[in-house]
């Protein structure tokens, strides 16, 4: 896959951004700002892809992703 997609939406009741992805099994993020959520996604997506067997441990290439809000 060339780029992973993350869907972000604002939860007005909880006052946080929620991020999920059909491309990355297990991805569920919550952050106070969209920028914080994007940073968390850049940290967590590679870890989940390794756990899901999509990437190999030690693969240090950046994982491209796009956030749609």
Image (cartoon, rainbow, N blue to C red):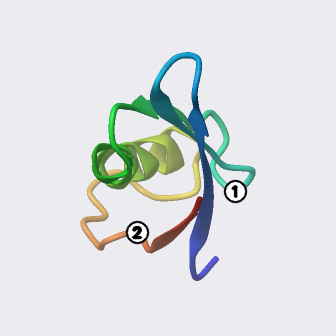
Image mark count: 2
* Residue sitting at x 44%, y 74%: 64
* Residue sitting at x 46%, y 47%: 50
Pick the front one: 42 or 60: 42
Give the percent coordinates (x, y) of residue 34: 38, 49
* Residue sitting at x 46%, y 24%: 15
For mark 2, give the secondary structure: loop
- Disc 2 packing (10 Å; few <14; some 14–19; many ≥20): some
For mark 1, give the secondary structure: loop
Residue linked to disc 1 = 23
Q: Which mark is residue 32?
A: none
Pick the front one: 46 or 66: 66
Give the percent coordinates (x, y) of residue 36: 28, 44
**Looking at the rendering, in which quadrant would you find the C terminus?**
bottom right
**52 in relation to 56, above or below:** above
Give the percent coordinates (x, y) of residue 44: 38, 42
Residue linked to disc 2 = 63
**Looking at the rendering, in which quadrant would you find the N terminus?**
bottom right
N-terminal label among 1 and 2: 1
**41 in relation to 13, above or below:** below
Outermost residue toward the bottom? 2
Pick the front one: 4 or 61: 4
**12 in relation to 69, above or below:** above
């Amino acid at each position: 896959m060339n780029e992973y997609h993350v869907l972000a939406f604002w939860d007005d009741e909880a006052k946080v951004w929620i991020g999920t992805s059909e491309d990355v099994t297990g991805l569920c993020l919550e952050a106070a700002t969209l920028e914080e959520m994007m940073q968390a996604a850049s940290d967590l997506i590679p870890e989940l892809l390794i756990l899901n067997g999509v990437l190999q441990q030690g693969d240090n290439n950046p994982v491209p992703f796009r956030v749609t809000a």
